[in-house]
Amino acid sequence: MILSINVHLQYRLSRPTDLLLQIEAADLSDQNVRQTRTRFSEVANVSRIAADDGLGERIWLRADGLFQFDYSAEIEIDRPKRDLSTLPATPPHQLPGEAVRYLMPSRYCPSDEFQTFVAAEFGNLSGGAQIAAMRDWIERSFQYVPGASNAQTTALDSFVQRQGICRDYAHVLVTLARAATIPARFASVYAPGVTPPDFHAVAEVYLDGAWHLVDPTGMATSQNIAIIGVGADAANVAFLNIFGQAEFVAQSVSVSPV
Amino acid sequence: MILSINVHLQYRLSRPTDLLLQIEAADLSDQNVRQTRTRFSEVANVSRIAADDGLGERIWLRADGLFQFDYSAEIEIDRPKRDLSTLPATPPHQLPGEAVRYLMPSRYCPSDEFQTFVAAEFGNLSGGAQIAAMRDWIERSFQYVPGASNAQTTALDSFVQRQGICRDYAHVLVTLARAATIPARFASVYAPGVTPPDFHAVAEVYLDGAWHLVDPTGMATSQNIAIIGVGADAANVAFLNIFGQAEFVAQSVSVSPV
Amino acid sequence: MILSINVHLQYRLSRPTDLLLQIEAADLSDQNVRQTRTRFSEVANVSRIAADDGLGERIWLRADGLFQFDYSAEIEIDRPKRDLSTLPATPPHQLPGEAVRYLMPSRYCPSDEFQTFVAAEFGNLSGGAQIAAMRDWIERSFQYVPGASNAQTTALDSFVQRQGICRDYAHVLVTLARAATIPARFASVYAPGVTPPDFHAVAEVYLDGAWHLVDPTGMATSQNIAIIGVGADAANVAFLNIFGQAEFVAQSVSVSPV
Amino acid sequence: MILSINVHLQYRLSRPTDLLLQIEAADLSDQNVRQTRTRFSEVANVSRIAADDGLGERIWLRADGLFQFDYSAEIEIDRPKRDLSTLPATPPHQLPGEAVRYLMPSRYCPSDEFQTFVAAEFGNLSGGAQIAAMRDWIERSFQYVPGASNAQTTALDSFVQRQGICRDYAHVLVTLARAATIPARFASVYAPGVTPPDFHAVAEVYLDGAWHLVDPTGMATSQNIAIIGVGADAANVAFLNIFGQAEFVAQSVSVSPV
C-alpha cells in the first residue's frame, strides 16, 4: 500500500524557543519513502538527530514568532502479513540488548504492577497468542472516548477507567505485554481511516526475533501503518516537544491511500 | 582511586528461571577494570548483552535450584575533578540523540509534573549552577530513611514525603534536572563508605557536552564512584531482574579503597 | 456584610436521573438567611436531607428532560473578626468527636504523606500561627491557573505542580493542617469578587475550640464568605452530583454586596 | 453467637504523646456487650468521644513511657441472616443524609474512577444481587497476600495488583459499590477464624434502608462479626492513631466463640 501524508503545524512563539519535532515517516526495509518534502519557517538553528533505537529522525529547531511546519510524503508499505497468534515468544535469555529495555516499566506503562493480573487472565497462553488475547480483551473492554485522558494519564489509569484514545490503548497493551515478559514499545504512526484524522499510535511487540505492529484499537493493520518513530511510551515519541511557551494556531494531518 | 569490590548473591529457585544481572563495573575511559572475576552456579544458558547506552553489560542466565553469583574486581578510577557549578548547559537544540531521551519523563521520574516548581525555585540559575542548587536543596530538604520507600515509590512520592534512600535521592535530582531541560539519567554504582554497605545509586547530568556524576546524598564523589550501568531510572538498571519466583538466601556487597 | 446571591443552572437529561444539589447558603449563628428562594423544574421526586456535620441541606431530585434550578438569597454575615495567628491549637486529646474525623486523610487530601514536610517547614510554629504560615506559603508558592486541574487532581498533585484553582488551594491547606494534627475541612462557599464569578471554596480549621475560615487564595475574608456546606474535601460538597448522564446547558453564579 | 475477645497492645513512648484508640466492640441492637473490661497504663489525660456515625467510641489518651492497653469482652451477636442477593437497592433520591456521604470517594476508595468498569461488568444487576456479584468477583480475582500492601495502598492499586489483605478487599468492594451508587462504608471488626489472628475489616453496604455486612475475603459472615467502628475507609477507623513517635513492643488479638 502507498500512503500519501500531509501535515501542517502552526504555532506562535513569543521568544526564541527550542522545538523538537518527530514527524517524518522513517525509511525502513518494509516502508519505503518514495517522496518526501519538509519545509518550515526560517529559524535560527536546525539540527537533525537520530531518534530512539536509530529508527527515524528528530529535528531540533530554535524558532521565534509565527512558526509553520509542513510535511508531505508518499510512503510505500510492504510489510509481510504475519498471523500474530502463531508467533512464538523469544525466551527471555535470548533477548538482545535492544529489546531488553522494552521489558521494563516506563512513565506511562507501569508494567511492574500488572503481573498478577496478567498471570491470572492470560497466563495459559504465550507468545503471539497471548498478545492476540490481550489485544482482543482491550478492544472488548475499553471504550474509545476522546477527551477522557490527558497528558498525565498512565496505562494504570486507563486500565481502571476502561476508556481512552489510541495512545491509551497502546499504553495498556505495551504494559500487559511487558508484564508477561514480552518486550513491547510504543510506535507513533500514520494510518488511513483514523477518525478524526490525526497522528495515530500503536504498540510493537518483540516475538520470534523481530518487532511486530499491533493496533489494539482495531483501526489500522500492519499493512497500512507508516511508522514515524518508537520509544518506551508516548513520553519518548511526541510529534512535538516545546521547551518553553507556545500558542497553538493550527494543525492538520491527512493520510490517504494513493 | 582504586576500589576493591566484592559481591555475593544467593537465591533459591524452584524451577528453571530467567535471570538478568547487571553487577559488573563497566570498563570506561575514566574507570579502568584492573582485575575482575565473575563466577556463578552452573546454569542452562548464558548470554552477555550490551546494557543501556552501550555502557557496561548485562548477563542473561537460565538457572535452577540454589543459584550463587560472585563478583570481585579492582577498578581504578581516574575521573577528572570538575567544579559542577561552573559547567555551562548545552543548549537543547545542540543535544545529541543519545542525550535527548534523558530529557523525557520515565517510570520513577515524572519530570513533566515539576516544571512550575523548578522554574520558581531554580529558574534564576542555569547549567551546573542550577544542578548544584538542586543537589543542595535535596540534601537539605530530605531525610535518609531506609525502609521509607519501596519498589513503587516515584520521585513524586519522595518529593512529597521528603525522605528515602539513595535511589530516591537520585530519582528526585534526575526529575528536577529534566524539568529544567537538562538531560539526566540514573546510574547504578559502587562507592566506598556507603552505610550500610550496598549497591549505591546516583544521578548523571549532561552539561557542557558530557555526562557528569552527582550524588545528592553527599555520600560519594565522582572520584570514588565505579559505574555499573545507566538508564532512565532504577527500572532500567536493576542489579537483578528475576522473571519468575525466587527465594532470597543471602547478599553481601563490600567496596573499599585499595 | 449582606450578600446578594443568584444562581442559575440548566441541564438536559435524556432519561429520569437522580440529582443531588447542595447550593443554598446555610443558616448559621454567624450568617443569617434574610431572604431565600429556590425554584426548579417540575420533578418526579424531591427530598431534603441534612448535609455533612448537620451544616446546611442537600436536595435530592429525580428529574427528566430540560432541568432548571434557580436560587436567589440575601445572606447577612456577622462573623467576628479573629486574628488567625493568635489562635491557640486545641490539644489533640481535647478534640471532640466531630472534629476528629477531620484529622484523617480523604480523597483529595492525603495528609498522611505530608508529615515530614510539615514538620520541617512549619514545625517551629503551632496553632493559628502555623496555619497562617501555611496559608502564606501557599499564596506565595502557587499560581492560580484555571484549567490546570481536573476532577482527579489531589492536593498531592497540586503540591507538586504548584498551580490550581480555589478548590486546589483549599485542598493543599486542608492537607497541610491535618498533617500538623489540626482538624481541617473543605467549605463550599459564596464570596464576592471571585474572578471569574463562580462557586468558591476555602478551608476551615479547628482552633481554640471552634472552626475558622481561611482562604489561601486571598480572594475572600471570613467577613464576606457565605458557607453552603462543609465536608472532608471537594468530593463531599459538590454543588451538583449527577447519578447518570446529563448535558450541560448553562450555569451562572453572581454574588455581590448589597 | 457469643465471641470472647482479648486484645493486648504495648508501645514505648519517649515523650508525652497523644493516642487515639478505637478497639472496643460497639454496643448495638444486634450485638450485645455482655462483659467488657478495658485497662491501660496510667496516663495524663483520658477522654472518650463518639466515633463516626455515633457507632462505638474512641478513647483519647495522653501517655508517656511504656504504654499498655488491655481489652477483653464477651459480645453476643444476634444479627438476622439475610440473603444479600435478594435485597433491593434504595433509590438514590430516597437515601438519608447519613448514607449519602458513603456514596462519595474517600482516601483509599476513589470510586469516581470506576464507573465505566462497574457499568460494563455489573451493570446488568442491581441492589444486593449486584453487591453479591462484586463480592464473588473479588473473591475469585484477588489473592490474599500479607505484605503485598501498605498504608498508602488504595483500592485502585489493589484493583490493578489483584492482591492484598482484608483491608484491601474491603476497600475494593466499598469502591465498586459506590461506583454503582450504593452507599458503602468500611467496618473495623472482630471475627473468629481470621488467620493470622488480628483485627479484621469488612465492608458494609446500604440496601433496603439499612446497613449490611459483607466480607469479600469470605473469612467471616454477618453472624460472627463484632463491629468496632465504621467510617469512609481504613483512614477513618484505625485501631490506633499515634500523634508522634512510638516504638512497637507487642500486640496480640484473640477472638473465639464461647
Image (tube, coloured by chain):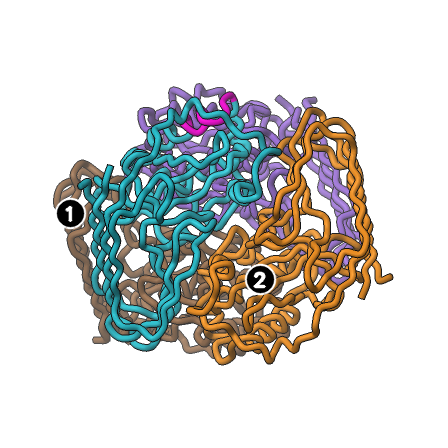
Chain colours: A brown, B purple, C cyan, D orange
State the residue in front, C82 or C37.
C37
In the image, B246: left or right of C165? right
In the image, C96: left or right of A5? right
Query: Local crowd at mark 1 within 10 Å, few (<14), some, or many (≥20)?
Result: some
How far apart marks 2 and 1 lie (CA) works out to 50 Å
In the image, C193: left or right of B18? left
Q: Secondary structure at mark 1?
A: strand
* Residue beneath the point at 51% across and 28% down: C89
In the image, D191: left or right of D174? right
> Can residue D209 be seen in the rendering of this structure?
yes
Query: Local crowd at mark 2 within 10 Å, few (<14), some, or many (≥20)?
Result: many
Residues marked 2 and 1, same chain: no
Question: Can you give x and y, in whole percent of width and height, for residue A79 in the image?
Answer: 38, 73
The disc placed on residue A67 is 1
Magenta part of the protein: which range? C124-133
As drawn, D134 above or below C118? below
Q: What amino acid is labelled 2 in the image?
A: Val
Question: Of circles 2 and 1, which is in front?
Answer: 2
Q: What amino acid is labelled 1 in the image?
A: Phe
Q: Secondary structure at mark 2?
A: helix
* Residue beneath the point at 68% across and 22% down: B257
Q: Chain of mark 1?
A: A
The disc placed on residue D157 is none
